[in-house]
Amino acid sequence: MKNYKDSDYALNKFSEGIVYRFADRIVEITLEDYLSENPGKTAEDFMELKALSDEIYHQQVIDENRTSRLDVSINGLEDTEALATASLDTELIHKKDTEKAIEAARQLLDSGGLTEVQRRRFLLHFFQGLSIRQIAALDEVDYRAVWDSLYWASKKLPPPVFLTLGERKFSKLPFA
């Protein structure tokens, strides 16, 4: 409940009657109004209705609080890079580049241009998604040895493919 004083629940709870808020006005049904409109009813009936209306308003507040904290304003989110969707052209170009990179990597793997260790590490890293440290743990070597092996294996790829596969992995190095 953002502003308790403006809530229907608070208005109804702290009023002697049953309160209904409309867009243009607020109507309060008092005990006297209720009894005059319903001659067969008693003050006890009115108190039951009052308690019921309090409970309904209270449940509305609880439901609003449960969902409002999950609501997020989308103003400006479309400009954030994390939520921005790439254009169809960019997606198609990326897909085509990735296909070319995978094909070139397969040719390199089949050509025999890599040592057996480079080939195995290349497959584990670029095709199975293992990290350099995970591969180092499997091989029981320092991670730098795995990194060097992958770097030199990637260098044997044609330049556009090297950039597609290795750009994120090796671009932060001073000699890359």
Image (cartoon, helix red, strand yellow):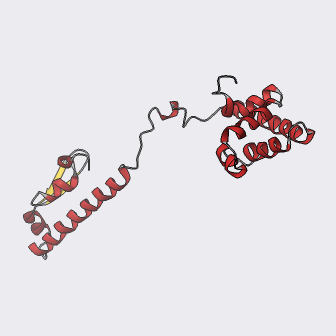
| Quadrant in which residue 91 is drawn | top right
Q: Toward the viewer: 99 or 173?
A: 173
Is 48 placed left or right of 148 in the picture? left
Whole-percent x, y for residue 104 in the image: 85, 35
| Quadrant in which residue 98 is drawn | top right
Q: Which residue is rendered at x = 81% and y = 39% of the image?
A: 102
| Rendered view: 172 above or below 85 | above
Whole-percent x, y for residue 150 in the image: 75, 37
| Rendered view: 174 above or below 92 | above
Whole-percent x, y for residue 109 in the image: 87, 41
| Rendered view: 72 above or below 54 | above
Q: Which residue is rendered at x = 10% and y = 61% of the image?
A: 30
Whole-percent x, y for residue 134 in the image: 66, 48
Residue, far front: 141
Q: Toward the viewer: 103 or 76?
A: 103
Q: Toward the viewer: 60 or 87?
A: 87
Quadrant containing the C terminus is top right
Q: Which residue is rendered at x = 91% and y = 39% of the image?
A: 112
User: Is residue 63 in view?
Assistant: yes
Q: How many marks?
A: 0
User: Is residue 95 in view?
Assistant: no
Residue, far right: 111
Q: Toward the viewer: 52 or 104?
A: 104
| Rendered view: 171 above or below 30 | above
Residue, far top: 175
Is 6 placed left or right of 85 in the picture? left
